[in-house]
Amino acid sequence: MIISEVVTGGDMARFIRFPWKIYRHNQNWVPPLISEYRSFLDRRKNPFFEHAEVKFMLASDRSGRICGRIAAIVNRRHVELHGEKAGFFGLFECENDRQAADALFGAAADFLRSRGMTIMRGPENMSVNDDIGLLIEGFDSPPAIMMPFNPAYYPELVEARGFRKTMDLYAYYGDTREQRLPERVARGIELCRRRYKFQVRPIDLRRFDEEIDAVYRVYTQAWEDNWGAVAMTRKEFDYLVAQFKGAVDPDLFLIATVGGEVAGFSLALPDFNQVLIKLNGRLFPFGILKLLWYRRKIDMIRVVTTGILKQFRHRGIDSSFYYETWKRSTAKGMPRGEMSWILEDNAAMNNALRNLGLRLYKRYRLYGLGL
């Protein structure tokens, strides 16, 4: 196997297009929009690169045929915040070929080791704030928006290299056509609202910038104690907001307030993967027409993120977010929903979702390897 760094525009085009080869017979893979994906990987456009060093690599055989790809990532903010010399691998795609996979992981390890890292962890594509983890259960359906997908043989390739489990991430599923919210939960939420005097409302698009400022303040504090958390810089946050702003339904972007103070937020998005799976990565020439047609048929949401300030936790705000999202999305013709991702050791969140009657239906795994 020959490992080469992505240097030219042509190299990057091959890097981006390689997954189409891997998933050409997989009906559950959702192709990314090539234009957006190219921008995401562009060091000049994505502010993640301001504090990270990334090496993109391709594996090819002696005939020049590409067999796999990988990114080796040094996120300096992670090193500083967590005090560990952990680098990451991400964007891993590979044929079912142990030799190719070993060559890619070996090259990534060499790069991380040269930068002083002593741990390789992943996959993170490219940070904990992007889609992360290797799918290990739940291959029978497409991923929800902003969630990863991979062939069932990837875990074997990763574990054969010596990687071992670091943390599992859970995705929960519910369908209001098949189940009703337990009445005791609805009563409990109403009691909590009266007792703790909080309100839940949709984001005010007329004051979008002001609302986003408040959301960012909550975001930077709400996850600081979570395993592996690395808060986005304001530039990264604004970049992400710009990416999903067009997909936001204000009725599903909820704000919790206590005495006028923003206490938390919850963001759910319509599952635009139901549209993207029809576009094959391109909006032109007919992708826009398909987008307009198929977006009307979206029947599922994904709760992307929920954050509550510490002083307002354990008051039922999280359950209220899910309850309101459940009701609002159903009224909009989207009765199905995914809540993801949830750390396996987040007992409070896992219990809240199970109490709402949701079921664990996909599991993702982060792996680690000593260098």
Image (cartoon, rainbow, N blue to C red):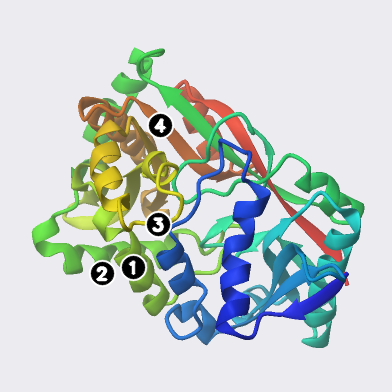
Q: Name the residue under label 1.
A: 217
Percent x, y for residue 92? 70, 60
Q: Nearer the viewer, residue 329 or 140?
A: 140
- Amino acid at the residue labelled 2: Asp
- Comes first in the chain, label 2 or label 3: 2
CA gap, disc 3 and disc 4: 26 Å
Mark 1 or mark 3, whichever is nearer to me: 3
Residue 232 seen from this side: no
Q: Name the residue under label 2.
A: 213
Looking at the image, the residue that sits furthest to the left is 206
Rate crowding at label 2 as few (under 14), some (14 to 19) or many (20 or more) other CA atoms within 10 Å: few
- Amino acid at the residue labelled 1: Arg
Q: Going 66% across and 73% down the picture, which residue do you hit?
A: 82
- Comes first in the chain, label 3 or label 4: 3
Badge 4 element: strand
Q: Mark 4 points at which residue?
A: 337
Percent x, y for residue 258? 22, 50
Image quarter (top left, top right, bottom left or bottom right) of the N terminus: bottom right
Residue 282 badge: 3
CA gap, disc 1 and disc 3: 35 Å
Residue 221 seen from this side: yes
